[in-house]
Amino acid sequence: MLPSLPDILRYYNENVIFRYEKDYSTGKLKGTEAFYELLKYMWLSCKHTQDLNKNPNDINLHFSCTVHEEMKDIDNMWHTFLLFTQDYYAFCQQYLGVFFHHVPATSQSNLSKEEYETELSRYLVYIDANLGEETLVKWFDE
């Protein structure tokens, strides 16, 4: 079972944050903030998987929790966290119960523009409903 978001947000990794700040000093999100946004994204993705498994016919859950271009600071933090393989593995096991794989976006999309917009709309509604408008704006404020 997925822990609550507050439980996951208790996790802190000083080394990951330090490395992110060293490598991505010009990012919109600074280290600690980017780290917590990544944890929120990972929690949301796992929650979405659980919700979709429980309600496979709910059309509002038919979207992918992907890292969009606007979320590049979160993706950069994820890349940084992955460098610390032991810490990343331990976090995934303890807090998510599974290894949370990073699957890079590809340049090829099988979705039409209309399908993409529908999926994105569902994703944005889901983010807002589960993490709030502040997170939604932080992730997609471009």
Image (cartoon, grey):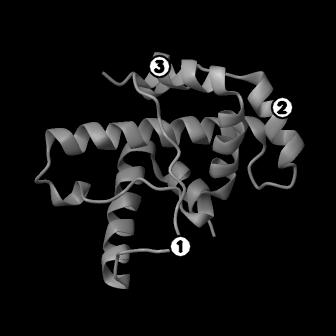
Spatial distance from mark 3 to mark 1, Cα to Cα? 31 Å
Do tag 2 and tag 3 residues touch (Cβ < 8 Å)? no
Residue at 31% x, 59% y is 63
- Going 67% across and 22% down the picture, which residue do you hit? 12
Q: Which residue is mark 2?
A: 18
- Which residue type carries mark 2? Phe
Q: Is residue 69 above or below residue 39?
A: below
Whichever of callouts 2 and 1 sits on the residue coming sooner in the sequence is 2
> Disc 3 residue type?
Gln
Q: Which of disc 1 and disc 3 is earlier in sequence?
A: 3
Apparent side of residue 78 relative to residue 44 in the rendered image (left or right): right
x and y, in percent, of residue 59 in the image: 17, 60
Residue designated by label 3: 93
* Neighbour tally class for label 2: few under 14, some 14-19, many 20 plus, Cα within 10 Å: few
Name the mark on residue 107: 1
**Label 2 SS:** helix
Secondary structure of residue under mark 3:
helix
* Amino acid type, label 1: Ser
Where is residue 141? Give x, y as percent: 61, 65
